[in-house]
Image: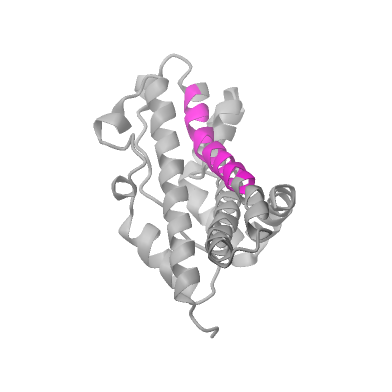
Amino acid sequence: MPSLDLTQLLTGFIALLISLSVHEAAHAWSADRLGDSTARMLGRLSLNPAVHIDPIGTIVFPLVAMATNLPLIGWAKPVPVNPAELRPNWRQKFMLVAAAGPASNLVLAAAAALVLRGLAPVEASGDAIAMSLANRLEYLLETMVFVNVLLAVFNLVPIPPLDGGNVLAGLLTGPLANTFDRLRPFGFLILYGLMLTGMLTTIISPPASLLLQLLL
């Protein structure tokens, strides 16, 4: 087992916590803007990580995964959305709410990449203290880019209950929409099947690698 670097562990956890909080807050904000105040009434329209933390998914699993060098695993409490409050055209509005989460992660990744590029003059300045701080910030920003790209691409996989599944559900109509809705209870089984067979990595890796190359 590789040695545990507490600095890297803490940095990765902070990056994941921020990214998950922004993701869920984006869901809550978009739902509220489209007419469903459920999340706002429950205090989820916030960037405060405390309101989004799931003890297992946000704390235990990610820390164990990072400490053991396993693939990064993490999730936050899902933001509740009431489709009845999104009428009319609730499918299309629900699709926008779902898309807001991954979109927020892509924006966060792009913002971190921009700040990262701005550190180059500091690193070239030769000042020891400035360089040390820049190196620490650089690692955090690189981690932010990496985590947010993975979160965005993973959540856009078109399988319920992932955001990509809800986006696809909003695009389908008629019999196709009804058929897809009947598959929803089996979404977790399909997702776990893809994870266990390695197919999920095959699906995620190409778009994630492309985005990381563009940003870094």
Q: How many marks?
A: 0
Direction top: furthest residue: 88
Nearest the viewer among 161 and 42 is 42
Q: Which residues are magenta?
A: 93-114
Q: Quadrant of residue 205?
A: bottom right
The colour scheme used to paint the residues is one colour
Q: Residue at x 41, y 21 (%)?
A: 33
Q: Residue at x 58, y 47 (%)?
A: 112
Nearest the viewer among 25 and 84 is 25
107 to 10, vertically: above or below: above
Residue 72 seen from this side: yes
Q: Quadrant of the N terminus?
A: bottom right
In the image, residue 29 lies at what x, y percent?
40, 29
Q: Main secondary structure of the magenta part?
A: helix
53 to 31, vertically: above or below: below
Residue 65 seen from this side: no
In the image, residue 62 lies at what x, y percent?
44, 64
In the image, residue 91 lies at what x, y percent?
49, 24
Q: Quadrant of residue 176?
A: top right
Q: Residue at x 40, y 46 (%)?
A: 21
Nearest the viewer among 179 and 172 is 172
> Was residue 144 drawn as part of the magenta stretch in this picture?
no
In the image, residue 122 lies at what x, y percent?
62, 55
3 to 66, vertically: above or below: below
Q: Residue at x 55, y 46 (%)?
A: 155
Compared across the picture, whether 76 is left or right of 120 comes to left
> Was residue 107 drawn as part of the magenta stretch in this picture?
yes
